[in-house]
Amino acid sequence: MPLRFLPVTAQWYGRSWCFNMEGLHSGCKQCGARLTSDEKAIYMKLVCRTASRFLCLDCLSESLGCTRQALEERIRYYRESGNCVLFR
Ligand SMILES: [Zn+2]
């Protein structure tokens, strides 16, 4: 498969996989909103680790049946715990 069709490149970084998401410019696959790296990371964490299209927090919370605030708290938790490679 040509490299340009692989929006997420992953490389072995120390003890864990590092996702390089710089090539990803697509917005939320539902509403098209611009996505932050946190939104992509929580989507990978909760939905699909190898996703190439993502949902914004509003659409993700709707599809998961929780509140946007719950997702924001979870992002903060992962970020502060410091042991998830997706949140840095
Ligand atoms: Zn959205």
Image (cartoon, rainbow, N blue to C red):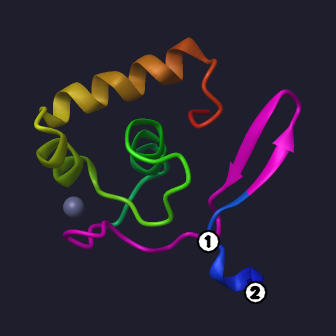
- Figure quadrant of residue 55: bottom left
Which quarter of the figure is the N terminus placed in? bottom right
Residue at (10, 37) in percent of width and height: 65
- Figure quadrant of residue 32: bottom left
Of all residues, the one furthest to the front in this rendering is 1
| Label 1 CA crowd tier, 10 Å (few <14, some 14–19, many 20+) | some
Q: CA distance from mark 2 to mark 1?
A: 11 Å
Q: Toward the viewer: 16 or 39? A: 16
Quadrant location, ligand no. 1:
bottom left
Which quarter of the figure is the C terminus placed in? top right
Task: Return the x and y of residue 78 as percentages of the image width and height.
Answer: 48, 22
| Label 2 CA crowd tier, 10 Å (few <14, some 14–19, many 20+) | few
The stretch in magenta equals 10-33
Q: Is residue 49 above or below residue 4?
A: above
Q: Is the residue indicated by label 1 positioned so its CB lies within 8 Å of ligand 1?
A: no
Residue assigned mark 1 = 7
Task: Return the x and y of residue 6 as percentages of the image width and height.
Answer: 66, 74
**SS under mark 2:** loop
The amino acid beneath tag 2 is Pro
Residue assigned mark 2 = 2
- Magenta-drawn stretch, dominant element (helix, strand or loop): loop
The amino acid beneath tag 1 is Pro
- First in sequence: mark 2 vs mark 1: 2
